Image (cartoon, rainbow, N blue to C red):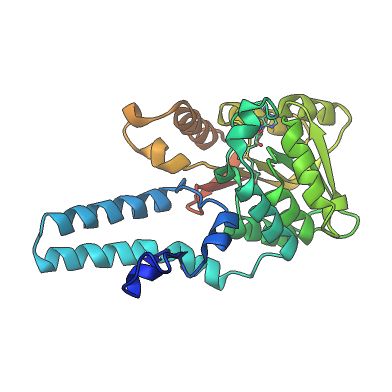
């Protein structure tokens, strides 16, 4: 948790030594500290809302018992993500470095300068808990061939590559040349990076090409444009891209809670995910489970 102190003021002399410290970091450290990602998961958003409600209650001077109850609820929800981080196997130095570089990049400037094809943001990166989950799936399945649909700066691709055997391979689909180059430079710093083959093109085109050449994959991770999810899913099932016994993992299937909140509150992405979830649930060819991990991770297997 961040806290802010002004050292000079704490020492009773602002002009003598006015020095900012946030979370124990000095000003020069702060200038190199990446901006904190905004909450983009149902839990993260819930925690932010609970914090706002508690502050509101403090200002309204509600009863001590109500304030106490709100603080307990906030602690229960707010402590979960940090606890998962603390108790999950630490990420590799290469993954930590990739995440830090992603957070430090000025994505708005890259887009306004025309270097990326769309507005990208650090919040797109899956991160520690999801990366470690995918890594364990790869190990459990003994997967050797993986298809990733939507790579961004490569966190999930590199996490999965770390669990692949030496002769394993990931084909990572990404439409943006800038992030593809960014990811490649991070992959080159890892002994596992050479297992990742980046295809820069719209994912559906890449997948159609792979299907035509009879490629197939043990694990597919879908994490690209939400409006394309149904097409990716249909192509995987209607071609031989998914190996017998293969698993499809689909990210953001809770999309910040939008699929189960009132329809009027949905964005286009929220609507696309609601439709995708319905489409999969109605498809008798598969069985699936939606795990409430981060922004929702659905696991699908052909029956
Ligand atoms: C949520 S990010 C992927 C995050 C990544 N899997 C990770 O774990 O860090 C989505 C990425 O999909 C890419 N993308 C969007 N539409 C695409 C398409 N039609 N084909 C290929 N990539 C696409 C975007 O450029 C973006 O980099």
Q: Residue, x 43% and y 28% (percent of image)?
A: 267
Q: Residue, x 23% and y 56% (percent of image)?
A: 55
Is 105 or 266 nearer to us in this picture?
105
Is 233 or 118 nearer to us in this picture?
118
Residue 258 in which image quadrant: top left
Above or below, 140 relative to 203: below
Q: Would you say residue 142 is visible in this rendering?
A: no
Above or below, 72 relative to 254: below
Q: What is the quadrant of the C terminus in the image? A: top right
Is 64 or 247 nearer to us in this picture?
64
Above or below, 4 relative to 144: below
Quadrant hosting ligand 1: top right
Q: Residue, x 35% and y 75% (percent of image)?
A: 11
- Left or right of 212 on screen, residue 202: left
Residue 53 point in image, percent of width and height: 23, 52
Q: Residue furthest bottom?
A: 11
Q: Residue, x 42% and y 63% (percent of image)?
A: 2
- Left or right of 14 on screen, residue 169: right
Is 277 or 12 nearer to us in this picture?
12
Residue 154 point in image, percent of width and height: 72, 47
Q: Would you say residue 236 is visible in this rendering?
A: yes
- Left or right of 113 on screen, residue 35: left
Residue 77 point in image, percent of width and height: 36, 61
Q: What is the quadrant of the N terminus in the image? A: bottom left
Task: Tally the numbered discs.
Answer: 0
Residue 279 point in image, percent of width and height: 52, 31
- Left or right of 245 on screen, residue 198: right
Residue 7 in which image quadrant: bottom left
């Amino acid at each position: 948790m961040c806290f802010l102190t002004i050292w000079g003021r704490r020492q009773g002399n602002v002009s003598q030594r006015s020095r900012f410290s946030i979370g124990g970091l000095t000003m020069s450290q702060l200038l190199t500290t990446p901006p904190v990602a905004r909450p983009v998961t149902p839990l993260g958003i819930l925690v932010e809302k609970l914090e706002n409600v508690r502050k509101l209650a403090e200002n309204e001077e509600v009863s001590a018992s109500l304030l106490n109850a709100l603080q307990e609820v906030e602690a229960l929800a707010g402590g979960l993500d940090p606890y998962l981080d603390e108790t999950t196997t630490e990420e590799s130095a290469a993954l930590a470095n990739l995440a830090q570089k992603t957070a430090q990049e000025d994505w708005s400037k890259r887009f306004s300068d025309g270097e990326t094809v769309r507005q990208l943001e650090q919040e797109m990166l899956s991160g520690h808990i999801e990366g470690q989950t995918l890594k364990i799936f790869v190990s459990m399945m003994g997967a050797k061939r993986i298809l990733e649909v939507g790579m961004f700066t490569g966190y999930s691709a590199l996490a999965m590559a770390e669990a692949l055997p030496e002769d394993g391979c990931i084909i990572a689909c990404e439409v943006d040349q800038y992030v593809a180059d960014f990811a490649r430079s991070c992959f080159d710093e890892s002994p596992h990076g050479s297992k990742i083959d980046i295809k820069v093109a719209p994912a559906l085109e890449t997948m159609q090409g792979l299907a035509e050449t009879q490629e197939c994959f043990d694990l597919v991770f879908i994490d690209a444009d939400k409006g394309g999810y149904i097409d990716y899913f249909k192509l995987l099932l209607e071609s031989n891209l998914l190996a017998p016994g293969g698993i499809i993992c689909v990210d953001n299937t809770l999309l910040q809670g939008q699929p189960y909140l009132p329809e009027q509150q949905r964005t286009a992405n929220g609507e696309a995910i609601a439709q995708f979830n319905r489409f999969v649930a109605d498809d008798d060819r598969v069985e699936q489970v939606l795990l409430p991990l981060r922004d929702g991770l659905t696991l699908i297997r052909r029956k």
